Amino acid sequence: MPEFESVDYFTDQSLIPDPYPYFDYLRDRCPVLPDGPAGVVAITGHQEALEVYRDPAMSSANAVVGPFAPLPFTAAGDDISELLEQHRGSIPMAEHVVTMDAEQHWRTRALLSSLLTPKRLSENEDFMLELADRQLDSFLANGRVEFMSGYAKPFSMLVIADLLGVPAEDHKEFRIALSDQLAGELDTEMQHNPLAWLEQKFTDYITTRRESPRSDVLTQLALAQYPDGTTPEVEAVVKLATFLFAAGQETTTKLLSAGIRNLAEQADLQERVRSDRTLIPSFLEETLRLESPVKSHFRLARTSTSIGECPISAGATIMLLPGASNRDPRKFDNPNDFEVDRRNVREHVAFGRGPHSCPGAPLARTEGRISMNRILDRMANIRIDESEHGAPGNRTYHYDPTFVMRGLSELHIEFDPAP
């Protein structure tokens, strides 16, 4: 595919609508490509991705910034572990769990054990059912909706707010402050760093709960301890809560919108899932496989190692492309086709694997299951709004212009009231 030889994956906007032919081009060159874009090692194979996700030689220190923040030291030799630990604090987002390794990552992630309990998740599921109907009630009479702003974004935001114990009386404030539609009305600091507002809110919550404990979820989070019984600094708890709050919304929003687009584009599939709701879990997994919400994961090789048969030098930046690995024909038959009853669909890597597998994956799956059920209960003949996206065969969809995430910017649909 000569047209891809000069393409810059990180900046070329022509790849945004459909990156999959480019991923095929990279995989055809080699599933482990040592001379990938911007000098990264590009992973497009499924088995090779599993190796990276599970290899303790791979650090997550650069998970967020990839190749765009140079290491604060010169990598030399076959083991940079000591240098990495000395300079870790200089790497962007080092205070967040997503960039932590080994014991630090395990200790920080363990703080979630007091929050992600079966009892709490069950309570959160009851809230989801009520919220789904409340969001649907807000637009069902119109027969049409822009699904992202009308359902997916407010639903996912309020679900994670409830899980973290944000008081119900503050839900409206969260929805307004974090709404994309109101970004132009926010102060300069909020526009520059949306997490700053969240961090202040959760700092207030956690500090107050530590001073005056209550019988609520925020108190459980505030009083959570590391496995050794020590109490984390307030800042550590706040960073964990805010990252979970922000990241949890992105995955769910993109899963819901991709799922609804699939139903709206394929009438036969819609009726099949509508008539057999047991297919919803596999429908969601196949949606995740074909449209993985995270487009790029990054890792840093702490030691010289190998992926597949490709030697990797210590200090190399590894770029995993879940959307490519999930369409690897060596793993999935007819990888570009949507097959709702695909035999091995749960083997996709949309949520990563290994120690850094997405902790919110069970929550996202539950949000998807409840949403799809209630939408199919209350909306019939769901279809794409052709006045916004064009007729079949000439559709136009806009996606978020980023190499980090894969998801629709907007999705206009029409529907009939369910009988």
Image (spheres, rainbow, N blue to C red):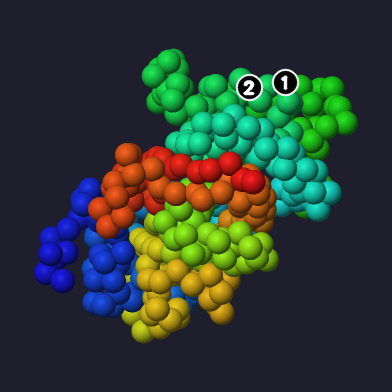
State the residue at coordinates (61%, 59%). 274
Q: Work out whether 417 lies above or below 203.
A: below
Q: Label 2 belongs to which residue?
A: 172
Residue in front for this viewpoint, 317 or 216: 216
Is 357 or 23 nearer to us in this picture?
A: 23
What secondary structure is found at the residue carrying circle 2? helix
Amino acid type at circle 1 is Glu
Q: Amino acid at mark 2?
A: Lys
Determine which residue is flagged by label 1.
Answer: 169
- Residue shown at the point (67%, 33%) measured from the top left: 134
Q: Is residue 247 left or right of residue 233?
A: left
Contact (CB < 8 A) between labels 2 and 1? yes
Residue 251 appears left or right of 317: right
Is 327 drawn above or below residue 271 in the view shown?
A: below
- Compared across the picture, whether 227 is left or right of 95 comes to right
In three-dimensional space, the C-alpha distance between marks 2 and 1, rounded to whole angstroms, equals 7 Å
77 to 147, vertically: above or below: below
Name the secondary structure under disc 1: helix
